C-alpha cells in the first residue's frame, strides 16, 4: 500500500468515526466537539488532493469559526445543560435506512461510471492561482460572495439581537 | 493507488451521515451540524474532481472556497435563528415548535 | 271560395289570438270577436258547400320539406266530405258560441272561455281540411288540447281538473296507437298524403295482416277520440266542463272527428283482407252502442245521460261505417250533431234555471220553460228515431246497412234503439213532466254543473232562459226536424265509390219504429204512470243495477291496473333516483370527505417529515428507474 493510500484510509476512518459521534451522540456538546476532528480530517483530504489553500481556509473557517459558533449557541440555549435525553425523533430507523440507501445508490452510480481524465496539471502554488482567478475570471463570483457575506453578517446580528 | 472513486465514495458516505443527522435529530443545532457535514461532503467532491478530472483549471477549488464561505454565512444566520427561537419559544427542539400546525 | 278554403280555419284562429291577448277590452268582453270569427267561418263554409255541390273541388298542396330524397307534400283538400263537415261545424259552432254568451254570463274568466272556443274551432276546421296524416294528427292533438282546457275550465273544482286529465290521458293512448299506424303507413308507402297512401296500398306496397294492423291502429286514434270501448271512460267525466263545451266538443264535433277519420281513410279499411278492419270497427261500435245505452238508463245526472247517449250514437256511426254504410254513418254524424247539440244546450238551459244537474230534483219544467221544452222534445224525438224527424232517417240508414251485412249487428242496433227511447223518455219525464221536486231553486252559490261564482238566477221561481240562449235552440230544432228529408241528395253527394247504398226494407223500418215506441212506452210505464216503479225494478234485479251503476267496473279495472301499476313504476323510478343516482353522487362526496379526513395527517407541519419524504421519493425514483 502506498503512503497516499494509507493516509487516505486513516483520514477516512477519522472522518467517519467523528461523523458518527456527531450524528448519534445523545450529548449535544459531544456532537459539537466531535465536529472538530471531522473537519480536520477533511482538511487532511484537501492536502492529499493538493488544495493547500482550501485546506487552510477549511481549518480557519470550519474548525475554527463555525465550530466555536455552534458551541456558543449550545451554551446560550438549553442544550448546554445536556439534561434532555431523547435527541433522536421518531423517524430514526427510517431515516437511517433512507440514508443508507442513498449512500449505496450514490456509491454504485459513482463506481460504475468511467470518469474521464482531464488534461493539464495542478498548479504548484495554489494560493497564487486562486488569487489570480478571483481577481480575474471569477471576479464576479468573488464580489457577489462578499456581498452575501455582508448581508448575512447584518442579518445574523439583527436576528440574534436581544429585543429591548 | 487512490483514485477518484475512493474520494467520491467517501463523500457519499459523509453525505449520508449528514442526511441522517438532519432528518432524525430533534435539536435545532444538531440539524445545523448535519447540514455542515453535507456541505463538507460536497466540498470533498468538488476538490477531488478538480484534481482528477480537471487539473488544468482551478475551478473546483474556487467553487469549494465559495461553498465554505457560504456555509459560514448560513451557519451564522441559522444559529441566530435558533437563538431567536429559543428566546421566544423557550425551546430548540424542532418537534416542539408547532405554533402554526393544525 | 273553394280554392282559398284554407282561410276558413284562420278566421277563428285570429279571433283566438285577439281574445287571448286583449280579451277584456274587446267588444262584449271578447265574445263578439269570437262570434264574428266563427260566424264568418260558418258562412264561408256554407259557401264552400254550395260550390262543392255544384261540382267544385280543390286539392291544394305544397312541398314542405325534403326528407333525404323524398319530398314531404302537405296541403288541404276540399271534397264533398270535407265540405259538408265544414258547413256542419261552422253552423253548429256558431250557434253554440252565441248561446255561450248567455250561459257563461258573469263568469270571471269569460274572455278566456271564448278564446278557447275559438282555438278549438280553428283546430276542428283544420282537421276536416287536412289532406295528409301529418296535418290531421297535428289537428288531432290540438283538439285534444282544447278539450283538456275546456273540460278543466273551472279548474278550481278538483273533479273538473281530474276529468280534464283523464280525458287527455285516455285519448293519448288512442293517439299513440294512431301514430304507430301512421308510421307503418309511411314506412311502406313513403308518403303521408291520403291519396298517396291509398295509391300505394292499391299498388300493393302494404298488404295482408300488416295492412289490417295499420288500419286498426289508425282506428285506435278514433277509438280514443270518439270514446269507443275500451277508451270510453273519459266522456262521462268530461261533463264536468261547462255545458256549451259538452255540446260543441263532446257531442257535435270533436268526438265526431273519429268517425270522420274512419270515413276519410276508408280505403285503408276496405282494402284490408276480408274487410277485417271493417269488422273490428263495426263490432267495437256495436258494443259501445249497447253498453253505453245500458249505462245511461241508471244515471241521475242529466248531462251524464246525454253523455252516454253520445257514446251510444257514436257507436252507431262506427257500426254504420263498419257495415259498409259509408253514407249512413256520415249522415247520422251530421244529424246527430244537430240534435245532440240541441239536447245539450237545452240541458244547459234547464241547469241554468234549476241550479242542479240531478234529474230527481227537477220536474214540471215544461210549463215554466216552454221554448226549452219544445226544442228539447223535438231533439229527443229525432234521437229516438221517430219519423219524420231527422234521426229516423239516419238511424234507419245505419240499420239497413247492418241488416244487409250482419243480422247480429242489426239486432243489436234495434235493441239499442229500444234502450235509447227508454232512457231518453225517462229523462224527459223526470225533467219536464209532473211536479217540481226541487227545493228553493237557483241557490246563490253555484250553478248546477258546479261553476263557482255564477250569477243567481230566479231566486225562488223558475223561468225561461234569455233569447240569446233560446234562439240557437230553435234554429237547431229546425235542423233536427228537417235534415232528414235531405237523405237522398246526401246520398248522391257523399258516397264511396264501389260501396252502394243498401236496399230499403220495410221490415227494418217498421221494427225500428216499433222498438222506439216500445222504449217510450216502457219509460212512460215506469216513470210517468208508475205502473211499475223503478224502485221495484231495482229490487228485482239488484245485480244488474249494481253492474250498470258501476259502469261494468271498467273504471275500477283501469284504476287498479294502470294507476296502481303506474304508481308502482313511479315509486320504483323515484327510489332508483333517490338511492342509486343520488346515492352515487352522495357517495362520491362522502368518499372524498373521508379521504381528505384521513389524508390530512400527511401534512404534519414538521419539515423533518417533509425532508424524509423528499429523500425517500428520490430513492424510490432512482430505484425504479435503474433497477429495471
Image (spheres, coloured by chain):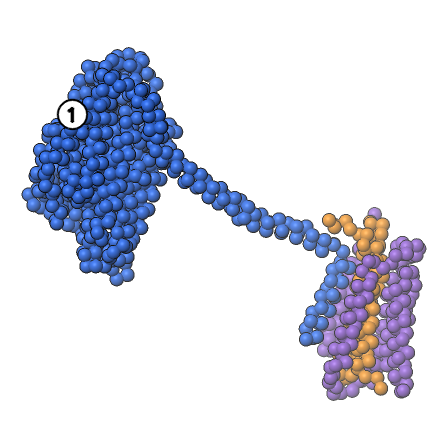
Q: Which chain is orange?
A: B
In this rendering, would C22 be left or right of C396? right
Q: Is residue C611 above or below residue B41?
A: above
Viewer-closest of C487 and A15: C487
For the C terminus of chain C, the image quarter is: bottom right
Residue at x-position 83% and y-position 60%: B25
Residue at x-position 82% and y-position 79%: B7
Taking the view exactly as shown, the residue that stands out farthest to the left is C54
User: Residue B60, image x and y in percent?
Assistant: 77, 78
The image shows a total of numbered marks equal to 1
Q: Mark 1 falls within which chain?
A: C
User: Residue C155, image x and y in percent?
Assistant: 36, 30
Chain C shade: blue
In this rendering, would C196 be left or right of A61? left
Viewer-closest of C199 and C11: C199
Q: Is residue B92 above or below residue C338?
A: below
Q: Check disc 1 and report its element: helix, strand or loop.
A: helix
Please name the residue that numbered disc 1 is placed on: C378
Chain A shade: purple
Amino acid at each position: 500500500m502506498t503512503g497516499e493510500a494509507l493516509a487516505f484510509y486513516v483520514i477516512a476512518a477519522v472522518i467517519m468515526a467523528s461523523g458518527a459521534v456527531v450524528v448519534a451522540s445523545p450529548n449535544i456538546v459531544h456532537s459539537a466537539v466531535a465536529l472538530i476532528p471531522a473537519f480536520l480530517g477533511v482538511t487532511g483530504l484537501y492536502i492529499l488532493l493538493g488544495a493547500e489553500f482550501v485546506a487552510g481556509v477549511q481549518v480557519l473557517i470550519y474548525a475554527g469559526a463555525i465550530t466555536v459558533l455552534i458551541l456558543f449557541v449550545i451554551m446560550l440555549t438549553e442544550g448546554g445543560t445536556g439534561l434532555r435525553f431523547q435527541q433522536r425523533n421518531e423517524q430514526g430507523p427510517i431515516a437511517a435506512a433512507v440514508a443508507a440507501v442513498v449512500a449505496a445508490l450514490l456509491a454504485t452510480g459513482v463506481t460504475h461510471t468511467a470518469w474521464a481524465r482531464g488534461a493539464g496539471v495542478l498548479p504548484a502554488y495554489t494560493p497564487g492561482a486562486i488569487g489570480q482567478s478571483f481577481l480575474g475570471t471569477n471576479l464576479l463570483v468573488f464580489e457577489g460572495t462578499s456581498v452575501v457575506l455582508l448581508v448575512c453578517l447584518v442579518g445574523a446580528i439583527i436576528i440574534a439581537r436581544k429585543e429591548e | 493507488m487512490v483514485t477518484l472513486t475512493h474520494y467520491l465514495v467517501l463523500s457519499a458516505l459523509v453525505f449520508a451521515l449528514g442526511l441522517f443527522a438532519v432528518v432524525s435529530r430533534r435539536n435545532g443545532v444538531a440539524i445545523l451540524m448535519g447540514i455542515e457535514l453535507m456541505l463538507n461532503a460536497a466540498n470533498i467532491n468538488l476538490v477531488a474532481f478538480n484534481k482528477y478530472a480537471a487539473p488544468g483549471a482551478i475551478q473546483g477549488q474556487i467553487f469549494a472556497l465559495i461553498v465554505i464561505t457560504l456555509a459560514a454565512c448560513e451557519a451564522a444566520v441559522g444559529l441566530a435563528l435558533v437563538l431567536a427561537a429559543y428566546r421566544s419559544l423557550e425551546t430548540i427542539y424542532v418537534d416542539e415548535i408547532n405554533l402554526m400546525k393544525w | 271560395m273553394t280554392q282559398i278554403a284554407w282561410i276558413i280555419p284562420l278566421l277563428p284562429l285570429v279571433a283566438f289570438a285577439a281574445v287571448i291577448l286583449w280579451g277584456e277590452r274587446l267588444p262584449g268582453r271578447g265574445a263578439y270577436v269570437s262570434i264574428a270569427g266563427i260566424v264568418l267561418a260558418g258562412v264561408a263554409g256554407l259557401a264552400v258547400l254550395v260550390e262543392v255541390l255544384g261540382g267544385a273541388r280543390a286539392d291544394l298542396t305544397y312541398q314542405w320539406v325534403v326528407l333525404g330524397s323524398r319530398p314531404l307534400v302537405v296541403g288541404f283538400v276540399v271534397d264533398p266530405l270535407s265540405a259538408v263537415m265544414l258547413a256542419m261545424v261552422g253552423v253548429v259552432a256558431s250557434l253554440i258560441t252565441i248561446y255561450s254568451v248567455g250561459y257563461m254570463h258573469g263568469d270571471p274568466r269569460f274572455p278566456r272561455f271564448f278564446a278557447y272556443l275559438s282555438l278549438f274551432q280553428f283546430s276542428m276546421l283544420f282537421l276536416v281540411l287536412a289532406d295528409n296524416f301529418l296535418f290531421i294528427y297535428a289537428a288531432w292533438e290540438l283538439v285534444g288540447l282544447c278539450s283538456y282546457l275546456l273540460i278543466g275550465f273551472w279548474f278550481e273544482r278538483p273533479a273538473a281538473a281530474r276529468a280534464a286529465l283523464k280525458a287527455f290521458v285516455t285519448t293519448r293512448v288512442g293517439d299513440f296507437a294512431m301514430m304507430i299506424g301512421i308510421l307503418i303507413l309511411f314506412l311502406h308507402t313513403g308518403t303521408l298524403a291520403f291519396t298517396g297512401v291509398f295509391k300505394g296500398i292499391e299498388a300493393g306496397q302494404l298488404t295482408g295482416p300488416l295492412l289490417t294492423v295499420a288500419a286498426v291502429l289508425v282506428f285506435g286514434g278514433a277509438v280514443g277520440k270518439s270514446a269507443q270501448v275500451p277508451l270510453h271512460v273519459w266522456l262521462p267525466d268530461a261533463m264536468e266542463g261547462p255545458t256549451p263545451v259538452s255540446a260543441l266538443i263532446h257531442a257535435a264535433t270533436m268526438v265526431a272527428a273519429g268517425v270522420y277519420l274512419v270515413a276519410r281513410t276508408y280505403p285503408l279499411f276496405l282494402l284490408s283482407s276480408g274487410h277485417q278492419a271493417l269488422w273490428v270497427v263495426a263490432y267495437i261500435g256495436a258494443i259501445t252502442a249497447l253498453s253505453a245505452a245500458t249505462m245511461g238508463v241508471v244515471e241521475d245526472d242529466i248531462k251524464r245521460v246525454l253523455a252516454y247517449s253520445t257514446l251510444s250514437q257514436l257507436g252507431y256511426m262506427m257500426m254504420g261505417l263498419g257495415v259498409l254504410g259509408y253514407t249512413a254513418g256520415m249522415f247520422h254524424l251530421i244529424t246527430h250533431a244537430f240534435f245532440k247539440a240541441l239536447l245539450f244546450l237545452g240541458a244547459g238551459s234547464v241547469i241554468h234555471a234549476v241550479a242542479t244537474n240531478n234529474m230527481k230534483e227537477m220536474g214540471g219544467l215544461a210549463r215554466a220553460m216552454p221554448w226549452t221544452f219544445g226544442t228539447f222534445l223535438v231533439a229527443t224525438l229525432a234521437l229516438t228515431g221517430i219519423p219524420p224527424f231527422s234521426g229516423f232517417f239516419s238511424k234507419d240508414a245505419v240499420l239497413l246497412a247492418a241488416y244487409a251485412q250482419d243480422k247480429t249487428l242489426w239486432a243489436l242496433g234495434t235493441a239499442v234503439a229500444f234502450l235509447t227511447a227508454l232512457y231518453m223518455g225517462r229523462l224527459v219525464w223526470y225533467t219536464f213532466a209532473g211536479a217540481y221536486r226541487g227545493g228553493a231553486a237557483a241557490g246563490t252559490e253555484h250553478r248546477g254543473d258546479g261553476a263557482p261564482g255564477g250569477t243567481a238566477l230566479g231566486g225562488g221561481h223558475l223561468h225561461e232562459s234569455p233569447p240569446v240562449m233560446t234562439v240557437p235552440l230553435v234554429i237547431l230544432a229546425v235542423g233536427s226536424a228537417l235534415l232528414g228529408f235531405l237523405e237522398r241528395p246526401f246520398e248522391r253527394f257523399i258516397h264511396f265509390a264501389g260501396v252502394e247504398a243498401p236496399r230499403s226494407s220495410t221490415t227494418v223500418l217498421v221494427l225500428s219504429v216499433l222498438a222506439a215506441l216500445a222504449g217510450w212506452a216502457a219509460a212512460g210505464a215506469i216513470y210517468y204512470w208508475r205502473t211499475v216503479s223503478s224502485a221495484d225494478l231495482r229490487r228485482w234485479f239488484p245485480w244488474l243495477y249494481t253492474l250498470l251503476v258501476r259502469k261494468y267496473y271498467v273504471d275500477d279495472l283501469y284504476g287498479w291496473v294502470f294507476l296502481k301499476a303506474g304508481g308502482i313504476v313511479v315509486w320504483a323510478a323515484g327510489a332508483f333516483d333517490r338511492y342509486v343516482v343520488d346515492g352515487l353522487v352522495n357517495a362520491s362526496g362522502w368518499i372524498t370527505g373521508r379521504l381528505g379526513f384521513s389524508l390530512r395527517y400527511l401534512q404534519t407541519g414538521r419539515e423533518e417529515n417533509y425532508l424524509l419524504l423528499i429523500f425517500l421519493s428520490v430513492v424510490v425514483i432512482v430505484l425504479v428507474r435503474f433497477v429495471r
